[in-house]
């Protein structure tokens, strides 16, 4: 501990133990506890107490202080547990009966403070930290703390109840670890008394008719098998698996969600890898659990590498049953048959689907989400029923929009039509799954139906904005998957037909009164242009539509998010040679209006930050790509953009301006493009002649002045980016700089004076004309590496140190004056 902190700590401990003093807030107490944790991890807790007897005095006074804040009491309990985690310190605290005074009946356990959840939580966390060695087990047994831990599993506070269950699992593991007499015996009756008592409590709870008690026991076991992988867990599972199997015989199965968690924890345990009986219990559960609970169990099994093949097949069948039921309920469902629809599973699934609207929606959304997660995994079932799943996703979407025809004589189909009509949750889940299925192909006729249902949703006036966004995303994912004739470099006729139908829909969506819809349409346009701009068929269809003109009109949209998306979209269109032109045959090859002034106006005048950021990103990309409007006069373009960026109040705009400056420098120096920011090696220095040209160009466009100003920016990311840019410039100029040093020293007084003013916050005065030699001389004189290191530190690194924390807490109680506190 630092001497300064050691001087402040006694006063703080005295203040914490005084009920009359204002209580420090939870954040300060948590930071103080983190500091003590750092000290105990780095050294001896016993030495810490011997050097700071005020801590012992605090822990002695806290249980006796009437009216003490629950927060301070909880802090003290956690601190005592943290210190007692080391066995020598535990013995030291035991000598003075300090620990029983805190954790026993003499402490908060038997007092009025126990009614505060904060105190109960601190008591459990303190014991959890303390229970790290065999001595702690004897202490807890003598204290009778196990009964309190067991009762806290049913606490009204979920945080307390969860922590109590985790502590019970930890105590079971601790009691069976590191026994002096050797490993635990092959039977539970051979285990230590504390372990037998915990197992006995778990057995009683599993046999209880009360579902909460069953849940508590299952949660303890789930934690145990998830964290303990020793051989004794085999004995534990052999003892308790019959009780878990008995739960499956009940109707309904109690605590089914917790039972699923336990079975998956057991299935994943490496200590039980040789136990084949666990798979029998899991297989029984798949057949007994309701579809809503069997689905998560099936998904968990299918993600395992060592799941038996027969069990995987059973789990996959269980996972697919809701969709099989939906397919069976529709007339002429698309795609070939292939989903399981066994007589045992169907009635239960149909009952679950039809029991209520919420149950049906929940089960279908869960199934679709599980299959979407399973689809990209390498261990997914093989063969993967791609075509039936495509048909099922299309059928679900048709039930939702009312276009599905129920199978004759099927009550399920009619009920599904009523339940799923206009259901946004199921529509979103089905569209997400449909998009995921685009990773694999499908029969051409089925892909056609996929496009048809996507077009239906994009066209429908009933589609909500969130559903439309999902439909746009799914469409984008399916477009590259459209089947194309071998050797053909352009779009196939069905896809061209789809695009011709899609573009009028996109036009209408760009005119929607709902800004979210306009925004989604612009995002889709940007992405589809990025992928398909090289296809002649797409270019022709897009230019024949009004979509580019509408996108440009949305630069004036009242909603800033839409304006930002419009900037990105028109920038992409212009980059790909697809600018907004008057539609129709009467304007073939008409004159193009320059987009640059419009986007410069957005950068300089838009009232919101999102469009200005988008404009800067477009300009940077244009410079990288050598856009025609940029290539006409690159230096003028860069100067105008940097001038606008330097005045912007949004730090992200200024930071993007520095990114554009970096691209300009790299191009002027003749480098191929932006290097990876994570590259280990520095870029090669440019030839001296190129360096001189680049420096003069950078001075002409006022890039150097912009970078120097940004070096003292109040927003740290901007200053960091500027520092990196100037370091890059200095390193690149090194060969030319060495040649110039022999020619005399340039006058840098004016530059250094300006830098001093900017460092002091006087940013108004410009730098004036700059000479490359002066720029390099200033760069040589600056400690840019040191500045980069300082900027890399967190903004509160000075205030975050322990001394500052102690000063702030003492200032809160009035012991320190304001001048001594570091109030931040």
Image (cartoon, grey):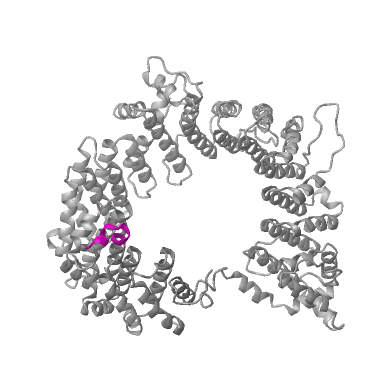
At which x and y percent is residue 14? 35, 76
Q: Nearer the viewer, residue 594 or 114?
A: 114
Q: Is residue 272 magenta?
A: no
Q: Position of residue 324 (x, y in %)?
A: 40, 28
Out of 185 and 475, give the one closest to the viewer. Answer: 475
Q: Is residue 41 left or right of residue 616?
A: left
Depicted 540 relative to depicted 756: above or below: above
**View extreme (left): residue:** 189
Q: How many marks?
A: 0
In the image, what residue occupies the spot 55% across and 36% down? 466
Secondary structure mostly seen in the magenta stretch: helix
- Taking depth in this image into account, of 74 and 385 the one nearest to the observer is 74
Q: Is residue 118 magenta?
A: yes
Q: Position of residue 598 (x, y in %)?
A: 79, 45
Residue 339 in sight: no
Examine the rendering and report whether any part of residue 655 can be seen.
Answer: yes
- Camera-nearest residue between 261 and 672: 261
The answer to whether 100 is drawn above or below residue 576 in the figure is: below
Please tell me which residue is depicted at 73% across the width and 49% down the height of the picture: 615
Write down the region rendered in magenta: 111-121
Tell me the quarter of the picture where residue 469 sits: top right
Q: Residue furthest front?
A: 20
Q: Quadrant of residue 229?
A: bottom left
Image coordinates of residue 719 in percent, x first then y, are 67, 66
Q: Quadrant of the C terminus?
A: bottom right
């Amino acid at each position: 501990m630092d001497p300064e902190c050691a001087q402040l700590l006694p006063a703080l401990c005295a203040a914490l133990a005084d009920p009359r003093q204002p209580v420090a807030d939870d954040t300060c107490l948590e930071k103080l506890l983190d500091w003590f944790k750092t000290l105990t991890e780095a050294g001896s807790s016993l030495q810490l107490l011997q050097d700071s007897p005020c801590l012992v005095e605090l822990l002695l006074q806290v249980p006796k202080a009437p009216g003490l804040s629950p927060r301070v009491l909880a802090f003290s309990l956690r601190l005592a547990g943290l210190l007692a985690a080391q066995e020598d310190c535990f013995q030291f605290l035991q000598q003075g009966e300090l620990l029983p005074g805190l954790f026993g009946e003499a402490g908060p356990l038997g007092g009025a403070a126990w009614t505060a959840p904060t105190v109960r939580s601190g008591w459990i966390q303190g014991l959890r930290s303390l229970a790290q060695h065999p001595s702690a087990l004897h202490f807890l047994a003598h204290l009778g703390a196990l009964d309190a831990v067991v009762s806290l599993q049913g606490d009204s506070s979920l945080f307390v109840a969860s922590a109590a269950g985790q502590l019970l699992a930890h105590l079971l593991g601790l009691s069976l670890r590191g026994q002096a007499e050797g490993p635990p015996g092959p039977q539970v009756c051979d285990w230590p008394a504390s372990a037998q008592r915990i197992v006995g409590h778990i057995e009683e709870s599993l046999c209880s008719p009360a579902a909460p008690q069953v849940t508590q026991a299952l949660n303890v076991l789930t934690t145990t098998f998830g964290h303990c992988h020793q051989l004794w867990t085999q004995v534990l599972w052999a003892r308790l698996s019959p009780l878990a199997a008995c739960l499956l015989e009940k109707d309904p199965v109690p605590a089914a969600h917790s039972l699923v968690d336990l079975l998956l924890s057991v299935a994943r345990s490496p200590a039980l890898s040789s136990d084949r009986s666990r798979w029998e219990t899991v297989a029984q559960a798949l057949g007994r659990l309701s579809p809503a609970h069997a689905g998560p169990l099936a998904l968990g099994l299918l993600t395992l590498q060592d799941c038996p093949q027969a069990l995987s097949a059973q789990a996959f069948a269980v996972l697919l049953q809701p969709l099989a039921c939906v397919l069976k309920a529709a007339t002429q469902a698309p795609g070939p048959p292939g989903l399981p629809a066994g007589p045992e599973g169907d009635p239960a699934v149909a009952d679950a689907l039809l029991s209520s609207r919420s149950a049906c929606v929940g089960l279908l959304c869960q199934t679709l989400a599980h299959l979407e997660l399973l689809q990209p995994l390498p261990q997914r079932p093989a063969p993967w029923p791609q075509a039936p799943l495509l048909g099922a996703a299309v059928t679900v979407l048709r039930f939702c929009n009312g276009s599905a025809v129920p199978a004759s004589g099927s009550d399920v189909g009619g009920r599904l039509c009523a339940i799923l009509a206009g259901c946004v949750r199921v529509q979103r889940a089905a569209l997400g799954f449909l998009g995921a299925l685009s990773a694999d192909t499908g029969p051409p006729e089925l892909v056609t139906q996929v496009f048809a249902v996507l077009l239906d949703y994009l066209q429908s006036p009933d589609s909500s904005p969130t559903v439309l966004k999902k439909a746009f995303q799914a469409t984008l994912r399916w477009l590259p998957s459209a089947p194309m004739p071998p050797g053909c470099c352009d779009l196939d006729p069905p896809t061209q037909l789809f695009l011709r139908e899609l573009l009028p829909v996109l036009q209408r969506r760009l005119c929607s009164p709902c800004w979210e819809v306009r925004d989604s349409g612009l995002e889709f346009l940007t992405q589809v242009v990025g992928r398909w701009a090289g296809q002649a068929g797409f270019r022709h269809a897009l230019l024949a539509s009004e979509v580019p003109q509408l996108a440009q009109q949305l630069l004036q949209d009242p909603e800033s998010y839409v304006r930002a998306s419009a900037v990105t979209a028109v920038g992409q269109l212009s980059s790909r040679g697809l600018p907004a032109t008057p539609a129709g045959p009467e304007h073939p090859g008409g004159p193009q209006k320059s987009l640059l002034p419009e986007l410069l106006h957005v950068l300089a005048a838009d009232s919101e930050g999102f469009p200005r950021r988008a404009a800067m990103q477009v300009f940077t990309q244009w410079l990288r790509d050598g856009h025609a409007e940029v290539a006409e006069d690159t230096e003028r373009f860069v100067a105008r953009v940097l001038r606008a960026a330097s005045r912007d109040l949004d730090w992200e705009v200024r930071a993007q301006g520095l990114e554009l400056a970096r691209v300009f420098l790299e191009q002027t120096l003749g480098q191929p493009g932006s290097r990876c920011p994570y590259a280990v090696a520095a870029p090669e220095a440019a030839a001296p002649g190129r360096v001189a040209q680049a420096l003069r160009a950078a001075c002409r466009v006022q890039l150097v002045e912009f970078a120097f100003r940004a070096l003292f920016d109040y927003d740290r990311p901007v200053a960091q980016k500027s520092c990196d840019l100037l370091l890059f410039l200095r390193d690149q100029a090194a060969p030319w700089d060495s040649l110039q040093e022999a020619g005399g020293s340039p006058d840098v007084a004016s530059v250094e004076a300006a830098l001093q003013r900017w460092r002091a916050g006087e940013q108004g005065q410009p730098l004036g004309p700059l000479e490359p030699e002066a720029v390099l001389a200033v760069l040589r004189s600056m400690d840019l590496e040191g500045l980069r290191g300082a900027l890399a530190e967190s903004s509160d690194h000075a205030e975050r140190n322990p001394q500052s924390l102690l000063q702030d807490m003492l200032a809160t109680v009035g012991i320190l004056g304001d001048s001594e506190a570091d109030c931040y």
